């Protein structure tokens, strides 16, 4: 697998007539900072003969450095003009993190997305600009897969629906969730693998409830429903353990549930 193109904020490197390349001499190994590095906080016991784990945290976000140049299949003259350089800088050197993904030549792996921005440096040979070095920084220690959409019909509340979480991170994710109530009453949405038991009382027939997994905001189409005082704030979660990826979802009130989330992928972009 060799990557020659990437997508950033809806545009492609190839749109600018450039490809990914390497101006460094070859070596036997290339170590990439792939993020996902955990710091283990410990406390000593028995005069330092044993240490207990008191907590963990990610130490850094994913970072990578790679080069780009003009595509020799498109250009006879590979010198980068000032205008071309400024176009690349304007596109990539942004004061915000935007959606980024590497595109490989065989598409053999699941697409992995990051939120990134770039510092840009010139690569000159004999004072002529032939390449650009990109120093990428992301806002997370991992990437995300393609968004997954699931729709479950709970007309029969005795039915259990199963969602298989494909995340590389053991734990849980808060999805975007939309609930359409088929009848009024008290609603409980339960997931056995995470133990989450989300309760919303006094639901109305035909009501559509939306919960944003990122902001934890909750909205309803029924203005007469005081949803904030009728919500237990145990937000629904999708999760997995080392031995179990099956989320068994059940409800107490007939409804339709729509879920959107992106699984965590622990893979570096280079």
Image: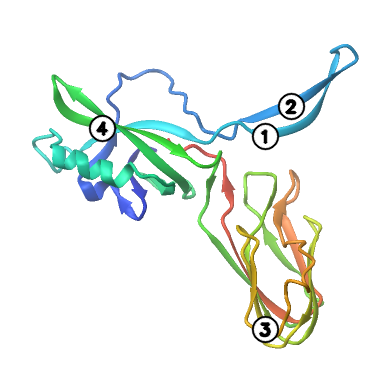
Answer with mark 3 or mark 4, whichever residue precedes in sequence.
4
Q: Mark 4 — residue?
A: 132
Q: Nearer the viewer, residue 27 or 114?
A: 114
Mark 1 in CB contact with mark 3 (< 8 angstroms): no
Answer with mark 1 or mark 3, whichever residue precedes in sequence.
1
Q: Residue at x 47, y 40 (%)?
A: 138
Indicate the quadrant where residue 226 lies.
Answer: bottom right
Q: Mark 1 — residue?
A: 57
Q: Mark 2 — residue?
A: 41
**Label 1 to label 2: alpha-carbon separation:** 8 Å
**Label 3 to label 4: alpha-carbon separation:** 54 Å
How packed is label 2: few (under 14 Cα within 10 Å), some, or many (20 or more)?
few
Q: Secondary structure at mark 3?
A: loop
Residue 225: image location, x then y, percent = 72, 82
From the viewer's perspective, is the residue at label 4 or at label 2 nearer? 2
Q: Which mark is residue 207?
A: 3
Q: Residue at x 80, y 30 (%)?
A: 54
């Amino acid at each position: 697998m060799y990557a020659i193109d990437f997508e950033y904020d809806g545009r492609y490197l190839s749109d600018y007539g450039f490809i990914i390349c390497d101006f460094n001499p070859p070596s036997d190994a290339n170590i990439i900072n792939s993020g996902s590095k955990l710091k283990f906080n410990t406390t000593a016991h028995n005069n330092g003969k044993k240490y207990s784990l008191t907590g963990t945290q990610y130490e850094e976000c994913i970072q990578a450095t790679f080069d780009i140049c003009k595509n020799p299949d498109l250009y006879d003259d590979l010198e980068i003009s000032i205008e071309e350089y400024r176009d690349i800088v304007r596109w990539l050197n942004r004061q915000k993190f935007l959606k980024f993904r590497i595109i490989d030549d065989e598409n053999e792996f699941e697409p992995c997305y990051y939120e990134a921005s770039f510092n840009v440096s010139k690569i000159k040979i004999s004072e002529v600009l032939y390449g650009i070095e990109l120093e990428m920084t992301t806002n997370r220690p991992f990437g995300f897969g393609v968004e997954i959409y699931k729709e479950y019909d709970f007309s029969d509340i005795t039915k259990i629906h199963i969602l298989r979480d494909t995340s590389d991170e053991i734990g849980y994710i808060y999805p975007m969730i939309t609930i359409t109530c088929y009848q009024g009453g008290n609603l409980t949405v339960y997931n056995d693998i995470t133990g989450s038991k989300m309760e919303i009382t006094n639901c109305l027939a035909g009501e559509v409830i939306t919960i944003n997994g990122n902001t934890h905001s909750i909205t309803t189409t029924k203005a007469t429903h005081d949803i904030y005082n009728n919500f237990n704030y145990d937000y629904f979660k999708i999760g997995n353990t080392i031995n179990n990826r099956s989320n068994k979802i059940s409800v107490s009130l007939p409804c339709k549930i729509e879920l959107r989330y992106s699984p965590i992928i622990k893979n570096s972009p280079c």
